[in-house]
Image: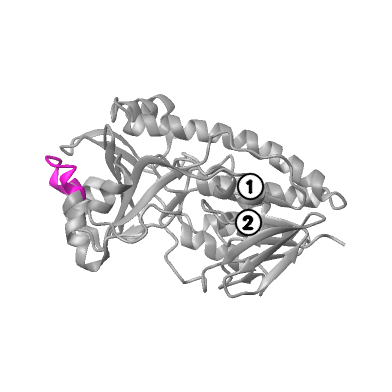
């Protein structure tokens, strides 16, 4: 009998793993802290790559469903100077290999592909401990618990499962994103909509930048990057647990305008159609501190447990996070199917390959971050775009 798999976290990595296991006839249960699939917004656009995200979806038998979600034209890329001058522009000609979809829609098709009851909503993992013989017990916030002989942490940056394998703790990179939205922008914010264009827009300078992406219709989703301490953001009006233990910090309704004005002041003198992405936002600004694990993060094999996605290899956003998480899930599912009588051999094979690819991607992410926000910004990113052509893609700066 195949060992049932217990997965903590119903993000893209955990759901891809559950789906691939289901395709191979291996039972799995996913425990998720959120109360329901609609408990919160699932983030913005994801560019799904030919070398990892797309093969994962093929392995899951969901490639055609994924293609139906693609938003045409969103691979268009432009880089602007602080005064709004276009420095680089590349249209979406349909050949760039990184089609864009909404994260929430991708999660929806993964959820729909699983048998009813696979995901147990409202189960926030608390204590996780080894109980001997390669088995582990997970206690949830409601006091219930489950014991399993195969545990997978797909629970993100601040994983409750990771301490079973590694003492590593994510560290703040020194840069945060501030997230905003403009809705119906073509009508209500035409200058900003024109500046962003039909896909991704980057307006960058050393240590800061305004990055935006057109989502469905006239929705503009912006990430403002600033290299500042977490204390600086707290002083700017982002209250609550901003920057701690992975929590996003919100300015709250009362302080939203003041916090937005403080962020916009860091871009004094920039084109008004760019700063409008901050000051005219239709949502309160939300702080997204960037944390990472070491690029070479790895662990010794521990029986009965492993990690996928950000739980295993948290890195600077570069458009690869969701792709890697799905690929991890698919590769782990394939390994378990290929070794039905030797779970440890499957986990070992999966981890060794995952360690190598995640270290390479983390190094690439650090290089991209330097191109975007280093002393040579924005010229470093433009040189990367022009040197790599379509392969540079619109993934730069994504939070995937």
Q: Is residue 341 left or right of residue 153?
A: right
Q: Which of the pair 135/394 is nearer the observer?
A: 135
Q: Quadrant of the N terminus?
A: bottom right
Q: Residue 177: in sight, yes or no?
A: yes
Residue in the foreground of this view, choosing between 80 and 321: 321
Residue 236 inside the magenta-drawn segment:
no
How many neighbours does mark 2 have within 10 angstroms: few (below 14), some (14-19), or many (20 or more)? many
Res. 129 image quadrant: bottom right
Disc assigned to residue 328:
1
For the residues labelled 1 and 2, the Cα–Cα distance comes to 9 Å
Residue drawn at x 67%, y 64% as measured from the top left: 138
Viewer-proximal residue among 372 and 215: 372
Label whose residue precedes the other's in the sequence (1 or 2): 2
The stretch in magenta equals 263-274
Residue 308 in the image: state x and y as whole percent.
62, 49
* Front position in the image: 64 or 283: 283
| Label 1 with label 2: CB-CB less than 8 Å | yes
The kind of secondary structure element at disc 1 is helix
- 194 on left or right of 366: left
Residue denoted by label 2? 16
* Residue 195, percent from left and from top: 22, 46
Q: Is residue 265 above or below residue 221?
A: above
- Which residue is depicted at the point 41% across and 32% down? 368
Please identify the quarter of the rendering in which residue 139 is found: bottom right
Q: Residue at left 27%, top 50%?
A: 233
Disc 1 crowd, CA 10 A, few/some/many (<14, 14-19, 20+): many
Residue 272 drawn in magenta: yes
Q: Residue at x 78, y 46 (%)?
A: 346
Image position, residue 274 (x, y; %): 19, 46
């Amino acid at each position: 009998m195949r060992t049932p798999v217990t997965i903590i976290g119903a993000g893209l990595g955990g759901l891809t793993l559950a789906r691939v296991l289901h395709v191979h006839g291996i039972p799995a249960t996913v425990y998720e802290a959120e109360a329901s699939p609609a408990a919160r917004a699932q983030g913005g656009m994801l560019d799904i790559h030919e070398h990892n995200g797309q093969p994962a979806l093929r392995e899951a038998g969901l490639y055609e469903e994924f293609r139906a979600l693609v938003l045409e034209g969103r691979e268009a890329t432009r880089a602007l100077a602080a005064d709004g001058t276009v420095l680089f522009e590349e249209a979406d000609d349909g050949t760039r290999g990184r089609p864009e979809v909404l994260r929430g829609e991708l999660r929806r098709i993964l959820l729909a592909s699983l048998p009813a009851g696979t995901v147990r909503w409202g189960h926030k993992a608390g204590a996780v401990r080894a109980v001997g013989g390669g088995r582990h017990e997970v206690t949830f916030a409601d006091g219930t618990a489950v014991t399993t002989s195969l545990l997978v942490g797909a629970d993100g940056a601040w994983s409750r499962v990771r301490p079973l394998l590694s003492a590593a703790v994510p560290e703040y990179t020194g840069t945060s994103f501030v997230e905003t939205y403009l809705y119906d922008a073509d009508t209500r914010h035409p200058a900003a909509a024109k500046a962003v264009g039909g896909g991704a827009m980057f307006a960058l300078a050393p240590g800061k930048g305004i990055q935006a992406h057109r989502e469905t219709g006239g929705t503009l989703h912006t990430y403002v990057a600033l290299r500042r301490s977490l204390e600086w953001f707290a002083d700017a009006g982002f209250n609550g647990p901003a920057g701690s233990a992975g929590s996003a910090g919100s300015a709250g309704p009362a302080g939203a305008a003041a916090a937005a004005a403080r962020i916009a002041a860091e871009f004094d003198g920039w084109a008004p159609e760019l700063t409008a992405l901050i000051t005219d936002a239709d949502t309160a600004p939300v702080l997204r501190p960037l944390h990472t694990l070491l690029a070479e993060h790895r662990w010794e094999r521990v029986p009965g447990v492993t990690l996928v996605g950000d739980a295993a290899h948290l890195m600077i956003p570069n458009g690869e996070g969701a792709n890697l998480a799905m690929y991890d899930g698919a590769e782990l599912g394939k390994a378990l199917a290929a070794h039905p009588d030797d779970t440890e051999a499957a986990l070992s094979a999966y981890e060794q390959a995952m360690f190598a690819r995640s270290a390479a991607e983390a190094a690439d992410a650090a290089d991209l971050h330097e191109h975007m926000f280093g002393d040579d910004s924005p010229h470093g990113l433009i040189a990367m775009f022009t040197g790599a052509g379509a392969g540079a893609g619109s993934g730069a700066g994504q939070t995937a």
